[in-house]
Image: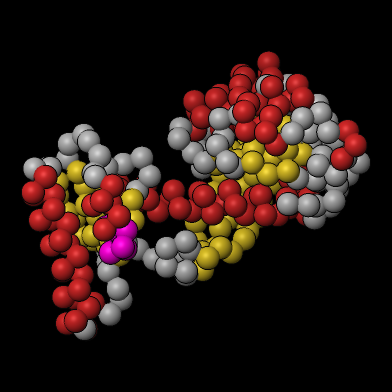
């Protein structure tokens, strides 16, 4: 069971109240005026636990009433879905190593010659993640789409291939600064189609230390992906597994937040 608090007017809660709610295990939902409180599994059979949860709800309710903020609570049972599907798209200029990263991640292999992808290529991998909220195992069927690197033609195909994606990996080549400078264009085009989904930037060919053309600071100052930046090497496999896994965890967190809000506002 979870209880979702929805604020029905614009405005932010005072930091002091948010701090108290976090201490009481309320979890803010990203991008919404909403908070979730998960009920302990023993609630129904343990009066002390039920009283504790009730006290937490009452504390917030009285605080909101005193602030004059319109709100409502919705309590529901969240389905323990242990298998989900994810669509992830790779974008970026040609020859940055998108196909090689996918090959390394899916097959743990590397080819010295880049695959010349026409349109897109779809690969699949299944992985098991630990749920960020309750620790249960979630089996993820991930389809990884390789978008061709010719920007002009890719623009025509973007809507078809990025539509329905839950996450985007934007790839640049650390030996060519021009691939970094064009990355925001790829990211913005992807977000325009996919909506507000997690973005992770992979700076590939990080094993070629003598040929670096830009630094991490350059990446942070150029892209709009925030702190989700990883230096990878498809050749050696460094950080490739972790990068895809981190994106999957970001998607999983977003997945449940959207699911809860949709259910309680239906």
Residue 47 picture location, percent across and down: 17, 82
Q: How many marks?
A: 0
> 40 or 108, which lies in front?
40
Q: Is residue 33 above or below residue 43?
A: above
Residue at the location (55% across, 37% down)?
226
Q: Is residue 26 above or below residue 6?
A: below
Q: Is residue 175 above or below residue 230?
A: above
Q: Is residue 75 magenta?
A: no
Q: Which residues are magenta?
A: 21-26
Residue 106 picture location, percent across and down: 73, 53
Q: Does residue 266 appear in this view?
A: no
Q: Quadrant of the N terminus?
A: bottom left
Residue at the location (75% across, 45% down)?
232
Instruction: State the colouring used for the structure image.
Output: secondary structure
Residue at the location (73% across, 43% down)?
231
> 206 or 78, which lies in front?
206
Instruction: Specify whether 256 is left or right of 188.
Output: left
Which residue of the protein is positioned furthest toward the top in this rendering? 152
> 21 or 74, which lies in front?
21
Residue 183 picture location, percent across and down: 65, 26
């Amino acid at each position: 069971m979870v209880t979702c608090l929805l604020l029905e007017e614009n405005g932010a809660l005072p930091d002091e109240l948010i701090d108290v709610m976090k201490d009481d295990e309320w979890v803010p939902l990203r991008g919404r005026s909403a908070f979730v409180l998960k009920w302990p599994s023993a609630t129904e059979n343990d009066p002390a636990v039920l009283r504790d949860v009730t006290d937490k709800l009452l504390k917030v309710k009285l605080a909101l009433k005193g602030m004059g903020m319109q709100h409502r609570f919705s309590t529901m049972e969240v389905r323990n879905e242990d298998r989900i599907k994810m669509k992830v798209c790779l974008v970026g200029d040609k020859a940055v190593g998108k196909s090689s990263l996918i090959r390394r991640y899916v097959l743990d292999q590397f080819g010295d010659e880049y695959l010349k992808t026409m349109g897109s290529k779809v690969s699949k991998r299944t992985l098991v993640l630990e749920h960020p909220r309750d620790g249960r195992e979630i089996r993820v069927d991930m389809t990884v789409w390789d978008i061709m690197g010719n920007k002009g033609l890719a623009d025509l195909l973007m809507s078809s291939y990025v539509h329905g994606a839950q996450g985007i990996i934007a790839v640049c080549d650390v030996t060519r600064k021009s691939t970094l400078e064009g990355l925001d264009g790829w990211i913005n085009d992807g977000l325009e189609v996919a909506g507000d989904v997690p973005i992770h930037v992979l700076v590939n060919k990080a094993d070629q230390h003598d040929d670096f053309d830009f630094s991490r600071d350059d990446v942070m100052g150029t892209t709009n992906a925030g702190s989700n930046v990883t230096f990878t090497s498809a050749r050696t496999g460094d950080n490739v597994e972790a990068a895809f896994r981190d994106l999957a965890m970001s998607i999983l967190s977003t997945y449940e937040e959207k699911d809860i809000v949709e259910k309680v506002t239906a």
